[in-house]
Amino acid sequence: MNTSLILVLALLLPLQNAKPEPMPLSSMIPGGYREEIYKGESQLGFVAVSSQTIEKNGKKIGFRLQKETNLTLQRFGSLVSLRMIEMQEMDLIGTVHRISMKQYQGPKQTLDLSGQRDGNSFRVWVGNNSERTIPWDIDGFGPLGKEQMISGKKWEHDEHLQFDCYQAIVNRFVTYDVVATKKTSNDPKDPVAWTVLMSPKKIIAGDLSLQLPKTLYFLDQNQNVLFAETEMDGIGEISLVRSKSTYIPNRSAKQIFDIGKASYIQTNRRLNAARSSLSNSYLISIPDLQGGNPLVEDERQKIVKKTNDSFMLEVRAFRLPDDVPASVAPNAEEMAPSKYIDWNNPAIKNFSREVNFLDIDPWRKSIMLEKLVRHKMMFDNQQPFSSASEIAKNPRGDCRHAAILLAALCRSEGVPSRIAHGLIYIEKNGVPMFGFHMWTEAHVRGRWVALDGTMGLGFVGADHIKISHHTYNEIESLAPIATLHNFIGKAKIQVD
C-alpha cells in the first residue's frame, strides 16, 4: 500500500456546481494550537494549526490560516516520514482569496497545489502542468473550514447546522452536517462536557461513491477542544489530542505504527492456487453501503447480491483475450500522455529497446512488455511514486510503479491502457488475507485484459478484486486511489 494515500490531495471527481451557504465566524483560530495524533497505542505525529494577520502598508487586511500535518510511520519495518501543509488566505470578513497545499515524502515534494479566487470562480493549479476552474461562492469556507468552525463557534445544546467547505481531495465543496450535544455526566472527573459531530455527505461520482470521514470533537465545559476522533486514509480510526488540554490520553508514544501491515484484510480461509484461479466468489462487508457502488463491475467481476452493508462479488479470470466478453471501446484518454503515464518520453522506448516488436499483434506485445517489467523491476516499497519515465530510468518500486510503467509501455506501442486499483490475495505467516494492489489493463483484440507487471504471468487470476480503474489523464497525484478509502481498515472479506 502506498503511504501517500494518507495525504492524497488532488483533482479526483467531476466538479460540483452547488454553492455553499455563507456562515461568517467572528474568530479566525486565535493563537493556533497543536494536536498529537494517536492510533491505538502508537503515536503517529502531530498537527499544528496557526493564524497570522496579513498587513499591507501597516494596515490589517486579512488572515492567513495554516495547517501542517507531520507523520512518522513504518512500512513493513522501514521508516517513512510524511508532511502536508495546507494554507488559506482570507480578507477581514472571511472571504477566501488564496489556497495552497504541499505534500512531502521525506525530503521530496510530491504535490504542489495552489488556487486563487477570481470573482465567483477559483483557479486551481497542480504543479506547473494542470489548471482547472471551479465555481466558488465568495462566502464559502476554504480547506480549513472545519478548523474555523470548531474554533470560532459557540454551541447551543442540540444545535444542528450545515456548512460547505472546499476539499482538495475531490476539488469541490463538500457539505457537512453538524450536531452539537451538551453531555450530562454523573462523573465529576469526566472533563468532557460537549460533543460536536461533523459528518460529510457522501459523494456520488458516476457509478462509484466516496465517503469522507466523520470527525467527533470532545469539548470541556468552556467549549475548548480536548481531543477528536476521526479516520485517516490507510490507517483507520485515529485520535487527535489537543496540547495543553486537561485531557490526558491513555496512550503510549513508544510504538511506531506500521501502515503496510495495517492495510491487510484478513479472510476466512485460504485460496488454493490463488494466482491461477479462474473463478472465485467473495462476500464483502462494508459499513453503510447505501448509495452508489463500492467498486466497478466489468467483464471480470459482477455484484450478484447486495444489502445495506454487504455484497457478493463473483470474479472470473480469462487466460486469453478471445475468452473475454466484448468490452467497451477505449477512449482518447487511454492513449494520451500524462504526468505519470508519460509514454512519449524517450526513456520509455529506451526501456524496451531490447524487445523486437515487428509483426507482433497487440496482445503478444502486451505479454512481452509485462514480462519485461517483471524481469527488470527491483522490488522496493520505499520508493516515492513517480512518472513512468522516471521509473524506466531507475526500475525500482512496488505494484504502483510496475502498473504505471507497464501502462506507459503499452501506450508507446499503440496499445490503449489504464490502471486498476484494488485488492490481491496474499498469505502472511500462513494467515490468508487481502492487501492493496495496482495492476494494468490493456485493450487488445477488442477486449480489456488484465496484466500484472509484478508477476509476469500473462494474465491475472480471480484472486485480484478490482475497486476502480483510471486513465490517469490530468491527474497530478495518487488521487484515484482514494476509492480504496471505503475498504482499507473497514471491509471484511469472506471467500465463499
Image: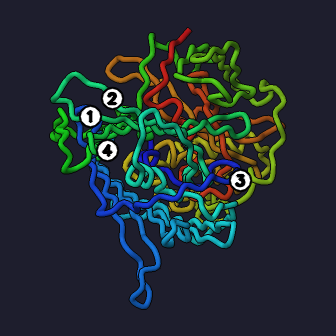
Secondary element at tag 2 = loop
Is the Cβ of the residue at disc 4 closer than 8 Å to that at disc 3?
no
Q: Within 10 angstroms of label 3, few (less than 14), some, or many (20 or more) residues?
A: many
The CA span between labels 1 and 3 is: 58 Å
Secondary element at tag 3 = helix
The mark found on residue 306 in the picture is: none
Who comes first in sequence, dot 1 or dot 4? 1
Q: Quadrant of residue 464?
A: top right
Image vertical order of residue 14 relative to residue 488, above or below: below
The quadrant of the image that shows the C terminus is top right
Question: Residue type at mark 2?
Answer: Lys
Q: 294 left or right of 488?
A: right
Q: 55 left or right of 468?
A: left
Secondary element at tag 1 = loop
Question: Residue type at mark 3?
Answer: Arg
Location of mark 4 (residue): 223
Location of mark 3 (residue): 411
Image vertical order of residue 7 relative to residue 237, above or below: below
Question: Residue type at mark 1?
Answer: Val
Q: Quadrant of residue 23?
A: bottom right
Is the Cβ of the residue at disc 2 closer than 8 Å to that at disc 1?
yes
Q: Within 10 angstroms of label 1, few (less than 14), some, or many (20 or more) residues?
A: many
Who comes first in sequence, dot 2 or dot 1? 2
Image vertical order of residue 142 relative to residue 306, above or below: below
Location of mark 2 (residue): 183
Q: Residue furthest bottom?
A: 57
The CA span between labels 2 and 1 is: 8 Å
Who comes first in sequence, dot 3 or dot 2? 2
